[in-house]
Amino acid sequence: MGRVKVGIGYIIGCLLSVLLWRFDRQVIYEKINEIIKKKLKGEVVIEFTYIILIALICYIFSFIRIGEINNFITAFIVIDISNTERKNLKRKERVHFYDSISTISRSMICGFIAPLFLIAFGGNILGIAYSFIYNIWYCNEELCIFKYLSTIMNIFPSIIGDLILYIVYIFRNKSAKVDFKGDFFKNLFIRPLLNIDIFAAFIESVNFYYYFDNSNTSFLKSYGHYNNKIDQGCIKDYLSIAYGICLIVFVCFFILVLNMAK
């Protein structure tokens, strides 16, 4: 029975996070960010303050010694994907359907796969630290340190997502060719979530546009097929695929946790 109990906190925390799908955590991060930006001036000062706060929270959390309570709190904090459906299906304008692809990809990787990957190989505290780092950067994209940390921590989880989506693409489209226009490895280390969006576009047979902007030039690139238009049916289908992937990843994560506890 001992082995069965190991990791049950992750299951309960995950289920509670999904059940409380109306609870939008980004609102909390946004309000905290607004308060800090009003009180403090300068990007460096704000980043340093956030780093101190994250370190302090992780330090306090490290004193929770009851294993499954620790696991429960961790899963509830880091898993954040269930409110994606509400956000995306409310969008009616065509331009927002393009945003929806990226929102689902972000939720799948940053709200599920990445934190579980980091917990499995680095422990609960690393998973919690990632969740704070990503959400803070998402609220304030001007914070360079958090941008770089989020990108680095998303590389391996994005590879996992890429592999699974590629398998889905092969079975659905009966083809192994995906045209990244020579950007796959560049994206992997600079903007890993873009590869997820591109796979989604090919799976759904839609075109996906990405706006590249840097100090020297700005341009728009188009990826994917042009067979269908992005609509609610497309979004629902990609959501179902994302939820299926999350279920597979969680089962693998739980099996790994059980084996590590032996």
Image (cartoon, grey):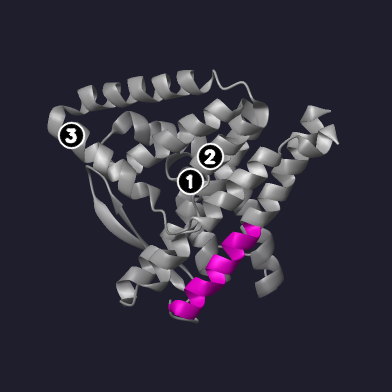
Check whether the beta carbons of the residues at disc 2 and disc 3 lie within 8 A of each other: no
* Residue at which label 2 appears: 155
**Residue, x 35% and y 72% (percent of image)?**
91
Image: 49 above or below 229: above
State the image quarter where residue 140 is shown: top left
Q: Residue at x 61, y 27 (%)?
A: 123
What residue do we see at 42% from left, 66% from top? 86
- Tell whether 3 sits left or right of 7: right
Q: Which mark is residue 192?
A: 1
Above or below, comparing residue 168 to residue 51 in the picture: below
Q: For residue 156, say whether it is visible.
A: no
Residue 81 sits inside the magenta stretch: no
Q: Evaluate if marks 1 and 3 touch, with contact meaning CB atoms under 8 Å apart.
A: no
- Quadrant holding the N terminus: top right
- Pinpoint residue 104: horizontal percent, then vertical percent: 47, 60
Question: In the structure shown, which secondary structural element does the residue marked by tag 3 occupy?
Answer: helix
Q: Please state which amino acid type lies under the numbered disc 3.
A: Lys
As shown in the figure, which amino acid type bears the numbered disc 1? Pro
- Mark toward the start of the polypeptide (1 vs 2): 2
Residue at horizontal 60%, vertical 40%?
116
Which of the two discs, 1 and 3, labels the residue nearer the N terminus? 3
Q: Is residue 152 above or below residue 61?
A: below
193 or 75: nearer the viewer? 75
Q: Secondary structure at mark 1?
A: helix
Mark-to-mark CA distance, 1 and 3? 28 Å
- Residue 211 appears in the figure: yes
